[in-house]
Structures are given as C-alpha cells and as structure tokens.
Image: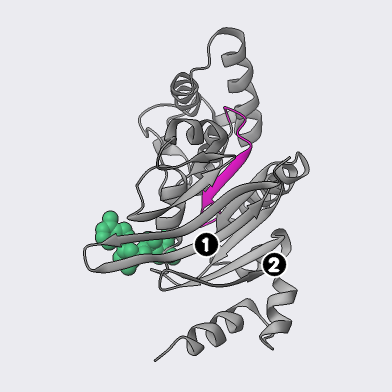
Amino acid sequence: MNSIAIEVKKLTKKYGKLTALSELSLNIEKGEIFGLFGPNGAGKSTFISILATICKPTSGDIIVNGHSVCRQPDMVKRVIGFVPQDIALYPMLSGKDNLDFWAGIYGLRGKLRKERIDEAVAVTRLEGRIRDRVSEYSGGMKRRLNIAVSLMHHPEILVMDEPTVGVDIQSRRYILDMLDGLRKEGRTILFTSHYTDELETLCDRIGVMDKGRLLASGPAAELESTYGADSLESVLEKLSGEGKD
Ligand SMILES: Nc1ncnc2c1ncn2[C@@H]1O[C@H](COP(=O)(O)OP(=O)(O)OP(=O)(O)O)[C@@H](O)[C@H]1O
Ligand SMILES: [Mg+2]
C-alpha cells in the first residue's frame, strides 16, 4: 500500500511577474503531522490553497491519495478538510445553522447529517452558545467552529492555514489537543504556523519555507542539529541567509 498521502511535484505558482512558489517538491506520509514554517509571503498559503483546490498551479502538480489536484479536484476535495487562513463562516447565521449549511454542501442527509452535526457541536465545545449568531462569537470560538466544519465529512487529510492565530490560550490549547487526537486516529495533518513552540511539540516534521522555496524539512531537533541552531527561527535565519546572493 502506498504510504504517501501528499506528493508535491515541482509545484510552481506565478502571479504575473511574482513567483509565489518555485518548483516545490515534497512527500507527506500518511498519518504524519507536517508543519510549514516561514516568514510572511513565503508561499505557505499559496501552497495550501493549491492543495485545497482553491487555485491552480502554473506548473507542477500535487497528488493526494493518488488523485491530481489539477485533473481530479473533486476527488481531492472528498479526502481533504480545509481550514483557511481567514474565517469562512456566515456571521448572521447561528453556529448550528452554519454546521447545517456545510453538512448540506458535503452532501450529508438524514440520520447521518444529524449525527455529524451533533459530533461537530461536541468538537467545538460550544454547546451553550451554538444557537447564537456567529457574529457574536469571539475569534477563538469562530476558529473552533471553522475547524469543526472542516471535519464534518470525516476527511483523511486535514489542511489548516494558521489554525491558532488570534485565539486565546485556552482555545489554542484546545485546538492543539484536537490535532493531537486526530493524529491518534491516523489522520494526516498539514498546517502552517508562526508559533515555533506548537510546531516543535506537535509536528513529526517541519518544512522551512522562504521566497517560494522549501529550504529544508525534517524533525525539529534534526533541523536544529543539522544547522547548528538552537531554535527554528535560527534555522530559518541560517537557511535564508545562505540563499542570499
Ligand atoms: N492573489 C494573489 N495575487 C497576487 N499575488 C499574490 C496573491 N496571493 C498571494 N500573492 C503573493 O504571493 C506571495 C506568497 O503569499 P502567501 O500568501 O502564499 O504567503 P504566506 O507564506 O502564506 O504568508 P503569511 O505568513 O503572511 O500568511 C506573496 O508575495 C504574496 O504577495
Ligand atoms: Mg498565509
């Protein structure tokens, strides 16, 4: 059986003259938690948007469980749960109605629909607030609901862009525990973060990106020892320093 969940093949994305991704290649194993780390504008969200079939690459491809994001986006959508960098919820609807709306999008009907909505409510731990409008939620509550939405169709692969940004410590702890729980269920998780502590604690491997390139990847401790660095920030500094003309 193929143990690779995500195979990135020479992925390039250009916006006019700007090269956001440059021939990025990477394999992510099934059941792995992989973190993407890099400065603003490194290309993390661009990569994740292509993986989530939101936008198309200029060249190259990503194979997700054997399916091409370019040629079989619908198959890819079925196996991926996507949490975008910006919150994607209807503010005027309640949390519950947002879940119901997304259940419909995922084609869930009848008993299964009710089950998955109940499960999602439990995931958010927002039972007491689930009938309030999303516009009345805090940032962390919205983020928790967003993550619950992305899990409703039980995707094998979870892709998240800065899932813990702007949330309080309690919600952050909760989101990280959730990711750890999903890993234990054998799901593959790819996420971006600017918080090195959570990358180091959670990720099996970390990919360091800058200027549209993957500069290195590996377990945090291995990266640090390879580059004689005492932190991920300093790994990035050393790597992007080396890349300068
Ligand atoms: N729709 C777009 N049109 C033009 N340029 C874009 C577009 N989206 C992204 N870019 C550019 O592509 C580059 C990579 O952006 P991207 O959003 O992927 O970075 P990022 O690593 O996610 O950064 P951040 O940490 O700030 O979220 C940037 O230079 C950005 O300005
Ligand atoms: Mg981004």
Examine the image and state in which quarter residue 34 appears: bottom right
Q: Is residue 130 left or right of residue 197?
A: left
Marks 1/2 in contact by CB < 8 Å: the verdict is no
Residue 105 badge: none
Dominant SS in magenta: loop
Element marked by disc 1: strand
Residue sitting nearer the eye, 148 or 151: 151
Q: Is residue 37 above or below residue 118?
A: below
Q: Is residue 16 above or below residue 167?
A: below
Tell me the quarter of the image containing the C terminus. Answer: bottom left
Label 2 CB less than 8 angstroms from ligand 1: no
Question: Looking at the image, can residue 194 be seen?
Answer: yes
Dot placed on the residue nearer the N-terminal end, 1 or 2 = 1
Element marked by disc 2: helix
Tell me the quarter of the image containing the N terminus. Answer: top right
> Looking at the image, which residue sits at the far right?
184
Residue at mark 2: 200
Residue 157 among those drawn in magenta: yes
Q: Residue at x 76, y 38 (%)?
A: 185
Q: Is residue 166 above or below residue 236?
A: above
Residue at mark 1: 25
Specify the amino acid type for callout 1: Ser
Specify the amino acid type for callout 2: Glu
Residue 77 among those drawn in magenta: no
**Residue 145 image point, x, y percent:** 53, 37
Q: Is residue 210 above or below residue 182?
A: below
Q: Which residues are magenta?
A: 152-167
Residue sitting nearer the eye, 234 or 74: 74
**Residue 18 image point, x, y percent:** 27, 68
> Looking at the image, which residue sits at the far bottom?
245
Residue sitting nearer the eye, 32 or 194: 32
**Residue 175 image point, x, y percent:** 64, 48
